[in-house]
Amino acid sequence: MRLRELYQSKQIDLSIELFPPKTEEGVKELFIEVEHLRKFNPAFFSMTYGAAGSTRHLTLDLADQLKNRLGVETMCHLTVVGQSKEETCAALQFLKQKGIYNLIALRGDPPRGEKNFKPHPDGFQHAVDLVREARKMNYFSIAVAGFPEMHPDSPNLASDLRYLKEKVDAGADAVITQLFFDNRFYYDFVESARKIGIQVPIVPGILPILSVQQIRRFTNLCKSKIPPALDAQLVKYENDPEGAVQFGIEVATKQSEDLIKHSVPGLHFYALNRSHSVAAVLKNLRLPNREVAKSDERLQ
């Protein structure tokens, strides 16, 4: 189902984000994890692009395999960083040929070791340029990124919201947010977006904590805040990997329950290619009509 058709009912639509593994063994393991998660009937899986487009060919190949070999609905990430307009348009044509119509259009992060974004000399400058290019093809349903705590490169929240509106006005059908741990950031972000005329669904991004070191590294990279109360709890699990995973499940469950009470259109889980925590959260949430009956499972 296209993004523009999702999020229209009272049902909570689930989506799960994956990334391209670096090895063939990793790819095999990824497909196993997808099989574990598909029984929760997510609306789609998404496949990320590496920094500076470093995994773009693998991303496109894996998106093709998810959609056409495994038969799961797939959204492909596409960035403008590190590639020319010709290369970007070729990627769009590939996705169209493979029947992958859901797309999230992103600027992309700088390559590792570089602090500032530098556009490709022959490439698009911003994510909004990619939205416009994809929309011209009259094929894709497009999502864009939203930042409840503001994009790290934005001078202020008002500027960040104006740019988000520009992307939506260019043709985006939905917004999927960066991770956050304080739901108030999300609620305030949605309220502010509505005030300036952004009316498309804004889907919260949820990252179950897998380790203390990991979540501190991730939040530092994307400039998301760890609330003081949560940070105080994390200290207990710095040398307890299993405890950290279980704690992460509890935190993500409570966060998701609160979001559901506030009638969010969907939940987008950053799975990091691991099914255990996301599956545990979804079981805890007990969302109706989500887990496929055992007789229908493709794991059989």
Image (cartoon, rainbow, N blue to C red):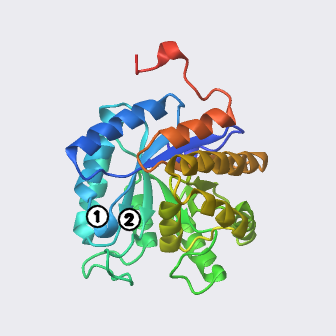
Residue 290 occupies quadrant? top right
Residue 96 image offset from top left, x and y in percent: 32, 47
**Mark 2 and mark 1: Cα distance apart in space:** 9 Å
Give 238 or 278, whichever is nearer the viewer: 238
- Assign a secondary structure to mark 2: helix
Residue lying at the far right in this picture: please name it: 261
Q: Please give the label number shown on residue 264.
A: none
Residue 202 occupies quadrant? bottom right
Residue visible at 46% across and 71% down in the picture: 128
How packed mark 1 is, by other alpha carbons closer than 10 Å (few <14, some 14-19, many 20 or more), is: many
Residue visible at 29% across and 65% down in the picture: 53
Q: Residue tagged by mark 1?
A: 88
Which image quarter is the C terminus in? top left
Residue 204 image offset from top left, x and y in percent: 62, 55
Residue visible at 53% across and 67% down in the picture: 216
Q: Amino acid at mark 1?
A: Thr
Q: Residue tagged by mark 2?
A: 133
Give 35 or 238, whichever is nearer the viewer: 238
Residue 231 image offset from top left, x and y in percent: 65, 66
- Assign a secondary structure to mark 1: helix
Q: Is residue 198 visible?
A: no
How packed mark 2 is, by other alpha carbons closer than 10 Å (few <14, some 14-19, many 20 or more), is: some
**Marks 1 and 2: in contact by CB < 8 Å?**
yes
Residue visible at 43% across and 66% down in the picture: 106
